[in-house]
Image (cartoon, helix red, strand yellow):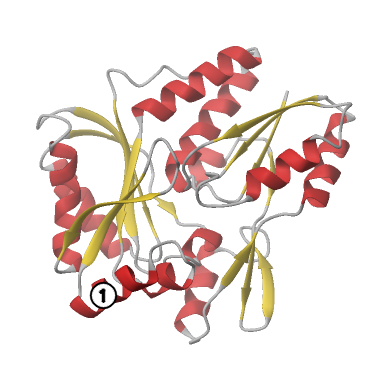
């Protein structure tokens, strides 16, 4: 079985070192140029470009034709394909994949909506790869992914709302008012629809960072052992602050920090920081 995904997930270089899967990049248009996220533009360069321009980036999904080409190519080696993608509540990517899958009848393509993105989606990619490598059957893999989806949660905040407003990911009026008032949202991803959920609000970015471990403490008692990974968009300083704040309340098994991919950063701008977490005692054992 082979894995196909898109560039809406984040993992650290250490995690991806031995992974083998096919990634169709989402695209970014900025200042008259189009880039393939994670292919011909990497996070460090992208956030530098954002700082040097007043233009707003525009993103687009892979086309059904691009998916079809990839499916046909890899099906020649192995017709069993697991195609796992960024939340349908935030992107039309899986719709393009579904259209393409219907046009490749010789392949056994299983489509999976991650219902999330970034590092939380990355954890699903990680689990899928390990399960495929271990020779698991598709039903068992899908059960594993469902279990991981139910156990994990992602939460983040950001200093600048203008990119979310521009990208239509939050109500323009609501976002504009929050921007004027200086309010910083704490945002999660809804488990049912896979859309952004406004969890809390803070008056400053620093207070928003401090609210993240407080939010987690409403779900788990202090001292709980958590599997945790921080992601940030060119903001290692805030990532360090968040790490220290979380460690004060919980026992943490940290995965290496990851950079927020360009196509996701196009909707948030530089400065975002957040984490994905799950209780260690109930997180499924990966093969």
Q: Residue at x 20, y 49 (%)?
A: 212
Asked if residue 237 is positioned above or below residue 228 in the image, the reply reads: below
Horizontally, residue 228 falls left or right of residue 51, namely left
Q: Residue at x 19, y 77 (%)?
A: 181
Q: How many marks?
A: 1
Residue indicated by mark 1: 177
Horizontally, residue 259 falls left or right of residue 107, namely left
Q: Is residue 84 visible?
A: yes
Q: Residue at x 90, y 30 (%)?
A: 76
Q: Nearer the viewer, residue 255 or 63?
A: 63
Asked if residue 97 is positioned above or below residue 202 in the image, the reply reads: above
Q: Nearer the viewer, residue 191 or 277?
A: 191
For disc 1, the neighbor class at 10 Å (few under 14, some 14 to 19, many from 20) is few
Asked if residue 39 is positioned above or below residue 106 in the image, the reply reads: below
Horizontally, residue 105 falls left or right of residue 274, namely right
Could you say where residue 168 lies in the image, as x and y percent from the top left?
Answer: 47, 66
Residue 235 sits in quarter: bottom left
- Which secondary structure lies at badge 1? helix
Could you say where residue 94 lies in the image, as x and y percent from the top left?
Answer: 64, 43
Q: Residue at x 39, y 63 (%)?
A: 170
Q: Is residue 269 visible?
A: no
């Amino acid at each position: 079985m082979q894995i196909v995904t898109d560039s809406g997930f984040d993992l650290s270089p250490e995690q991806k070192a031995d992974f083998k899967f096919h990634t169709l990049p989402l695209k970014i248009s900025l200042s008259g140029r189009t880039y393939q996220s994670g292919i011909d533009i990497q996070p460090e360069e992208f956030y530098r470009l954002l700082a040097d321009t007043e233009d707003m980036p525009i993103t687009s999904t892979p086309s059904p034709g691009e998916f079809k080409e990839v499916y046909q190519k890899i099906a020649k080696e192995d017709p069993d394909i697991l195609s796992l993608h960024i939340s349908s509540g935030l992107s039309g990517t899986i719709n393009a994949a579904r259209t393409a899958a219907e046009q490749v009848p010789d392949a056994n393509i299983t489509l999976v909506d991650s219902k999330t993105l970034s590092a939380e989606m990355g954890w699903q990619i990680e689990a899928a790869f390990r399960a495929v490598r271990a020779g698991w059957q598709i039903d068992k893999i899908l059960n594993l992914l469902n279990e991981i989806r139910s156990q994990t949660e992602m939460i983040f905040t950001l200093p600048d709302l203008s990119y979310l407003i521009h990208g239509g990911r939050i109500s323009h009026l609501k976002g504009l008012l929050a921007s004027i008032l200086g309010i910083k949202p704490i945002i999660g991803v809804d488990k049912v629809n896979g859309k952004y959920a406004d969890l809390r609000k803070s008056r400053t970015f620093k207070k928003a960072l401090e609210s993240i471990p407080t939010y987690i403490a409403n779900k788990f008692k202090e001292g709980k052992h958590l599997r945790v990974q921080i992601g940030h968009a060119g903001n290692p300083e805030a990532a360090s602050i968040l790490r220290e704040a979380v460690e004060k309340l919980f026992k943490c098994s940290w995965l290496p920090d990851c950079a927020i991919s360009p196509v996701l950063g196009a909707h948030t701008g530089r400065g975002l920081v957040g984490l994905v977490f799950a209780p260690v005692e109930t997180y499924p054992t990966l093969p």
